[in-house]
Amino acid sequence: ARRAVELSAFNSAARYANAGVELLPNRRRWKDPSKELMLELSSISAEVAGSLSRRRDLERWCEEILCRNELTIYDKLRAYICLIDSMGKNDCPDQAVDLCRVVLENLDCVFTKNQVGRDEEALSERLEATAKIEHDDEYMQLVIDLPLMDDREKLQSMTILTRLCGYFMILQDKQSFAMIVSRMARWTFHYGLSLESPVVFAYYAISFIIRGDFAAGALNGWIALSLLEEFSNRKAKARTIFLVWYYVLPWSRHIRDS
């Protein structure tokens, strides 16, 4: 099933995952030693159903996972992401935002006034430090040389934050968008890079475009594209290319160069 997903053979992946579930003992699927395999097969089934726009199957598999009290928030994260993405595809950004907030609270990622203030202060300091760098290549190298993020809670939170940022763009909520970008930027420069970093820098670039700083927007957009070479994440690649070339670079380069 995993190999089929890698090949984008989603119908085949669905059949393989379902066959794997059927081979597991019916009454002990969610008990050791089958629990980990059942979780993986169920998560794959939910993700594949989302790729095939089979909403009922997606919701059924997500419910199969989310109703299990013995599973942790980390075990359930893939199911939550499937539901969040499905809400977005079905023109329900408000519901997606609400679910993102619920998941982030479970991951202890909250936005109190003090924390938002720290995010904004750290971002301002970062912008001042960046302004002192004379050459763009130095700034780009500084980003690429950042360590890899190893905090599990923050790594998982980043996957939700990037989605939340996108929904705030759809809802044209500039204040909330800026708040999320500040949090993602602070965590990236403080804790390091992750699989979501190309998308993070794409949104970071958009935040500069909103302020009217097209040069800084273009620079961070190119960094987002450069980071795609460092991380193998097909979904992040698609989002990053779209965000950078649609929202950022047209302000500084002709569309024919895209």
Image: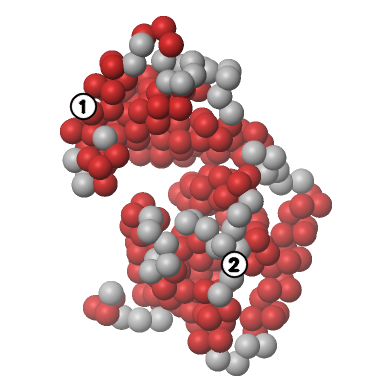
* Residue 5 visible in this rendered orientation of the protein: yes
Q: Is residue 206 shown left or right of residue 27?
A: right
Q: Work out whether 215 lies above or below 157.
A: below
Q: Name the amino acid type tagged 2.
A: Pro
Question: Which quarter of the rendered picture does the N terminus lie within?
Answer: top left
Q: Which residue is mark 1?
A: 15
Residue placed at 51% from the left, 35% from the top?
A: 77
Q: Is residue 250 above or below residue 175?
A: below
Q: Is residue 176 left or right of residue 42?
A: right
Q: Residue 27: where, in percent of width, then height?
A: 41, 7
The part of the image, by quadrant, that contains residue 181 is bottom right
Q: Amino acid at mark 1?
A: Arg
Label placed on residue 245: none
Residue at 57% x, 50% y is 155
The residue at the point 35 percent across, 39 percent down is: 89
- List x then y, in percent, for residue 38: 40, 23
Q: Quadrant of residue 45?
A: top left
Q: Residue furthest right?
A: 114
Residue situated furthest front in the rendering: 33
Q: Which residue is mark 2?
A: 147
